[in-house]
């Protein structure tokens, strides 16, 4: 009798512990963050691309509320809180391009031009842009056609680009050598048919923080929450703690000196399920491999949006809201 009692009591205790673990969130009550609204971009955009040089952010591509694809370059001055239209770029209009900055030079390209019934809809062109001289140069094409919603990260004299989409989900990462303008495949040893970490997917996010390269989330029949670190030298992915909260795709990501931020996105559980547009701001500590829910975007969730960092301030905006309206507003997230 006593043995049975101890058995059932232990089961109840384990059940209570399990409930406690499940019900605990990762919020951080000690974080003192503020969110303020900044000037809105004059042309609201979704699925745009952004990059930062010094104290200025640049936004280009994307689609407006009418669904028209854009190729204008906008400059945001964080000091004056103003937007300036720098005019059209030599690149074709598109959505879901990728961009990164190395040694004050911008590298940008890929994306989708809207031609669903044509393989040329998935763009492979790759360009450099010098914001000091306002000059563009076309470089060697990306060597694969999985180019929609690709991610890009910055190394020393090289870039890491991959995880795009072209009617198939992939997890290939390519290395771009800046000095020689050449590409090669980072030959990560993976079982390409296995449904394992890191998952074959697209619509994820990635960024570089203190010379380390992080990526995750995305979509493969349903939203994902995986998170990993790319080691390009040893050609391997290192599994890190999953992004908490809802699994998500079409989120936005940026990095300050010590933290990576993953913001918003869309949760989709699969066929015959409703999507949910997310508003949470998740902060990842690269030193402790831990996440912290530091707040929520005001006025509801956002997807297909942008995020960038100037100093220690994180900016999030544009994209689409819960009503699938294309937005132009921009928010600044900063410590008190």
Image: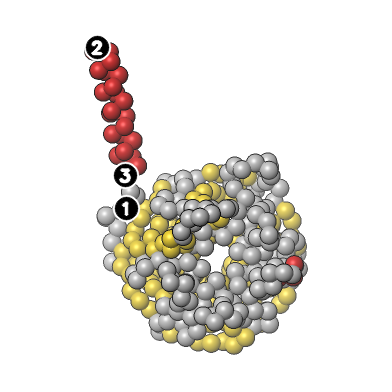
Q: Does dot 1 land on a helix, a strand or a loop?
A: loop
Residue at the disc numbered 2: 1
Give whichever of discs 3 and 2 has the lower sequence position.
2
- Residue in front for this viewpoint, 77 or 90: 90
Q: Which mark is residue 274?
A: none
Residue 327 visible within the image:
yes
Nearer mark to the viewer, of 1 and 3: 3
Q: Which image quarter: residue 69?
A: bottom right
Q: In the drawing, does residue 5 fall left or right of residue 183?
A: left
The quadrant of the rendering that contains the C terminus is bottom left
Residue at the disc numbered 3: 23
Q: In the drawing, does residue 315 fall left or right of residue 131?
A: left
Q: Residue at x 43, y 53 (%)?
A: 246
The quadrant of the rendering that contains the N terminus is top left
Q: CA distance from mark 1 to mark 3?
A: 12 Å
Label 1 crowd (10 A; few <14 / some 14-19 / many >=20): some
> Do the numbered discs 1 and 2 sit on residues whose CB atoms are within 8 Å?
no
Q: Which mark is residue 27?
A: 1
Q: Residue at x 42, y 69 (%)?
A: 322
Q: Does dot 3 land on a helix, a strand or a loop?
A: helix
Q: Which residue ends up furthest to the front in the rendered image?
A: 272
Q: Does dot 2 land on a helix, a strand or a loop?
A: loop
Q: CA distance from mark 3 to mark 2?
A: 33 Å
Q: Which image quarter: residue 36?
A: bottom left
Q: CA distance from mark 1 to mark 2?
A: 43 Å
Label 2 crowd (10 A; few <14 / some 14-19 / many >=20): few
Nearer mark to the viewer, of 3 and 2: 2
* Numbered label tally: 3
Considering only vertical position in the picture, is 175 above or below 334?
above
């Amino acid at each position: 009798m006593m043995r049975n009692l101890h058995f059932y009591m232990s089961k109840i205790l384990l059940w209570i512990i399990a409930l406690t673990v499940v019900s605990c969130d990762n919020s951080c009550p000690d974080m003192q963050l503020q969110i303020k609204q900044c000037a809105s971009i004059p042309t609201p955009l979704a699925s745009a691309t952004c990059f930062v040089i010094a104290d200025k952010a640049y936004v280009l591509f994307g689609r407006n509320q009418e669904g028209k694809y854009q190729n204008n370059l906008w400059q945001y001055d964080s000091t004056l809180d103003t937007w300036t239209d720098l005019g059209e770029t030599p690149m074709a209009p598109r959505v879901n391009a990728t961009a990164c900055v190395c040694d004050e030079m911008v590298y940008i390209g890929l994306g989708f031009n809207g031609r669903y019934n044509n393989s040329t809809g998935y763009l492979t062109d790759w360009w450099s842009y010098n914001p000091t001289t306002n000059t563009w140069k076309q470089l060697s094409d990306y060597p694969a056609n999985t180019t929609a919603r690709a991610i890009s990260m910055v190394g020393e004299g090289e870039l890491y680009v991959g995880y795009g989409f072209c009617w198939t989900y992939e997890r290939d990462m390519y290395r771009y050598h800046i000095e020689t303008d050449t590409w090669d495949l980072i030959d990560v040893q993976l079982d390409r048919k296995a449904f394992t970490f890191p998952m074959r997917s697209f619509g994820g996010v990635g960024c570089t923080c203190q010379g380390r390269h992080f990526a995750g989330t995305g979509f493969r029949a349903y939203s994902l929450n995986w998170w990993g670190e790319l080691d390009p030298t040893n050609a391997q992915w290192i599994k890190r703690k999953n992004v908490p909260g809802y699994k998500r795709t079409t989120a936005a990501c940026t990095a300050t000196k010590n933290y990576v931020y993953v913001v918003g996105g869309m949760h989709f559980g699969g066929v015959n399920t409703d999507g949910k547009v997310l508003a949470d701001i998740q902060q990842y500590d690269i030193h402790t491999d831990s996440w912290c829910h530091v707040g929520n975007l005001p006025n509801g969730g956002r997807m297909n949006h942008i995020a960038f960092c100037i100093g220690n301030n994180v900016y999030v905006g544009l994209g689409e809201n819960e009503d699938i309206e294309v937005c132009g507003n921009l928010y600044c997230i900063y410590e008190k």
